[in-house]
Image: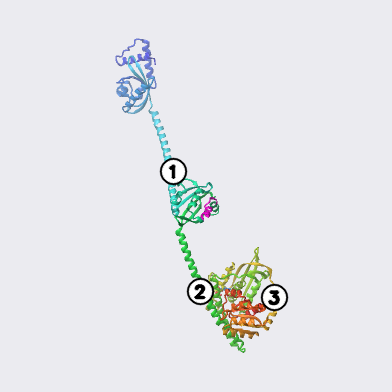
Amino acid sequence: MEQGLVETMLTILNTSNTSGTAGNDNPDDKKSAYELIKFFDEMPGGFFIYRADEEEKILYVNNAVLRIFGCSDRNEFNKLTGGTFKGLVYTDDLQAVEDSIAEQIKNSIYDFDYVEYRILCKDGAIRWIEDYGHYIKSKSAGGVFYVFIGDATEKRRAGIVERKNMLRQVKKSRDRLSAVIKEYDKELSLMNREHLRRLEVIEGLGANYESILYVELNKNSLVPYRQSERSMCLFEKSNEPSVFSDCIKRYIDKWVYPEEREQMRRQMSAEYICFRLTSEKAYSVNYRILDEDSIQYLQMRVVNVSPDGSAAQAVIGFRRIDEEILRETEHRDMLESMLKKAQKASEAKNTFISNMSHDMRTPLNAIFGFAELAKRHSDGNAKVIEYMDRIEESGRELLDLIDKVLELSWAESAQMGLNESRCVVSDIVAEVYKTMLPYSSKNNILWTVNCPPQADRCVYADREKLKHLLTHLADNAVKYTLNGGKAELSVEVSEIGGSFAEYKFIVKDNGIGISKESIGHIFEPFERERNTTSSGISGAGLGLTIAAAIVDLMGGTIATESELGKGSTFTVTLKLKKADEIRAEKAESENSMAKLLESRILIVEDNEVNLEIESEILSGLGFDVDTAENGAEAVEKIRNSDHGEYAVILMDIQMPVMDGRQAARQIRQLADPQLAQIPIIALSANALEHDRQLSAESGMNAHLGKPIDVPLLLETMEKVI
Ligand code: ADP
C-alpha cells in the first residue's frame, strides 16, 4: 500500500473518529483513500488497523471483521472489544500473542508477524483467528499495525481432529508396540527362566563332578565350566577357551598316576574321544591320580553334545569315585565270599546226594539180584515169579527216582559239561527205541521210530546226554499214553549251511495230553499235572527238568504242543556239527559172545552180597566167573594170568586196600602188553557223569551203574572185548 494513501486514509479515519473532518486537502488523495476504505470494507477477509502503543486502539475494522465477531456494526464491535486490540484478543491468549508479536517484529526485517489466538464473539462463541500483521510507522498516527485476519476455527478444528486421529494412530501403534514388547519381555523372561533352569539342571546333574569342560574336539579348544583346585592352574580361566591338548597334557603330567599316564594320554586325546563318540553317546574311563602321595580314584565321563550327530563337541566331567571303588571292592569281596559259601553248600549237597544215591543203590542191587535169582530158583511157581516181577518193578521206580535226583543235582551244580564225540544219531535213536520197547509192548502201545537217511551221518555230539534227553521224552510219551495208543520218535534233518546241520527230534504220542494250565510248568522240578496216587502213573516230576537242562547245555530249544485227551508233541531242535565220514558199519561181533563164554570173567567186589549176586547171575548165564575182593588182589590175579585167561574184568570202584581206579591204572601199566589191555568195565553205585569220566581217565573201557542191568552188561561186554 502506498505510504501517502495510507496516511490520508489514517487521517480520514482519525478525523472521522474525532472531528469527522479530513485533514488532507488533496481531493484526489481523499478520493483514493475513501475508495481504499471501501475496498477494505468489501474484502472477504478481515482487516483492521490498530495503533502500536500502550492502548492499542483500533483505528479501523472492515466489515469482514464485524462478520467474524458476529457484530452488525462498528458500535457493537467497539462495545464487545473496547475498540482495542487488547480487547479483541481472548484474555487468556493476550500476553502470549503480544510477546510473540513484539519478538517477531524485533527479528523481522520486513516488520511482519504471524500469530494465532482466540476471540470471543458476540454470541459468546470462541473462535480461532489467524493474524498476519505488518508494523508501519505512520506520520499522522505514529506506529500502527495493519492486520489481516481470517477465521481459522474450522481449519483448527480439522487440524485438531487430524491431530487427534494422528494421536489415536500413534497411540494405537504405541499400544501395538507395547503389546509386542510385552510379549517379547514375556518370552525373554521365559527364556531366562528356562536358561536358569537348564543351568540349575546342569549344576544338579554335575554336582558330583569337580571339573566340567566343554570341548570342541575339531578345534582342539576347551572352555572350563567348572574347575577343581587340581585343574584350576592348568585349564586357565573359566569361560575362556584354551588349547585342549595342552591343558590335558599338563593335567596328565601333573596329576595322573605315573603308570597310567601313557594310557590316559591315549584315552584323553581328541582322536580317541572322537573315535569313541562316533559309536557311543557317552562313556566313562576310570583312572588314578597321585595327590600328595595318596592315590585317589577318578572317573572321566565323556558325553557327545554335538548338535549334528557328529563327534565334534563334547562335555567332559571329572569326579572322585574313591567311595564307589571302595564299595565295589567290598561288594565284590562279599559276592565272592557268598559264591564260595554257595559253592561249598552245593558241593556238600552234591556229595550228600551222591553218597546217598550210592548207599541206596547198594541194597537195591541186592534186591534186584536176589529177585532175579529167586525167579531162577522158583521152579516155575507163577506167584513167586509175579511177586518177584513186582519187586523188580518197584525197585526200578525207586532207582529211576534216585537217578533223576542225582542227575538234576548234577545239572544244577553247573558242573554238567558236554562230552562231545563222533556219533551217529540213528544209532542213538535205535538205542532209545530198544530201551522203551519192553514198556511199550507191555502196555500194548505202538512205539515206532522214524529216521531219514541223513541221520546215519556221523556228527559231533554228547552221545550219552542226547540219549538221556530222548529217553526222558520217549519215556513220558509211552508212560502217558493209554493202552492201545501210539508213540513215535522221528528225526528231521535240514542243512543250514556251513559245517552244521539242524536236527529236529519229535516225540509224539496220542496219550492223555496236558492241560493249558499245566503246560507252562511242566519243565519246573517236581511239577506234575497229577500225582502218582491220582494218575496211577509213577514219576517224580524231574524228567522234563533234566531234559530241558540238557537241551540248554547243548544250545538247543524244546517246544511243547499238547491237548488234553488228544496227545502231546515235544520237539527238540539242536544244531549238530557234521563229521565228515559216513557211519562205519557196525563191526559184527558174532565171535565176541563165544569168546566171552570161552574165557573167564573176573568180578572185583568187596561187598559180599553184591559179589554173590553178580557171580550167581553171570554163572547162571553160563559164564566162568572168578572173583577178587579188592583192587590189589585183582591186579595180582591178572599179572599172574595167561594170555586170554580172562576176557573181561568187572571192577567195583570203592573198595578197601586198593580202589577200582587205582587197580585199573596198575593193570594198564603191566609189563605184558596183552595183559595190560584186558577190557575193564567199572561197575559202580556212583553213576554220575563225573564218575564215568574218572573211570575213563583211569583206563577203563566202560562204566555201568549199579544195580546191574543184565542186558546192558552183556551188551557192554560184547562191545568192549
Ligand atoms: P514225571 O513224568 O516224572 O512226572 P516229567 O518232568 O517227565 O516228570 O513230566 C512232568 C509232567 O509233565 C508229568 O507229570 C506230566 O503231567 C506231564 N507230561 C510230560 N510228558 C507228557 C506226555 N507225553 N503226555 C502227557 N503229559 C506229559
Mark earlier in primary sequence (2, 3): 2
- Give the x, y percent position of residue 393: 57, 81
Circle 3 residues within 10 Å: few <14, some 14–19, many ≥20: few
Stretch in magenta: 260-271
Q: Amino acid at mark 3?
A: Ala
Q: Secondary structure at mark 1?
A: helix
- Give the x, y percent position of residue 401: 55, 77
Q: How is the image coloured?
A: rainbow
- Distance, label 1 to label 2, CA atoms, is 77 Å
Q: Is residue 581 magenta?
A: no
Q: Amino acid at mark 2?
A: Ala
- List the single residue furthest toward the top: 26
Name the residue that disc number 1 marks: 184
- Residue, x 50% and y 71% (percent of image)? 344
Quarter of the picture for ligand 1?
Answer: bottom right
* Of residues 701 and 400, the one drawn nearer to the viewer in this rendering: 701
Circle 2 residues within 10 Å: few <14, some 14–19, many ≥20: few
Q: Can you tell which quarter of the image residue 445 is in?
A: bottom right
Q: Secondary structure at mark 2?
A: helix
- Distance, label 1 to label 3, CA atoms, is 97 Å
Dominant secondary structure (helix, strand or loop) of the stretch shown in magenta:
helix
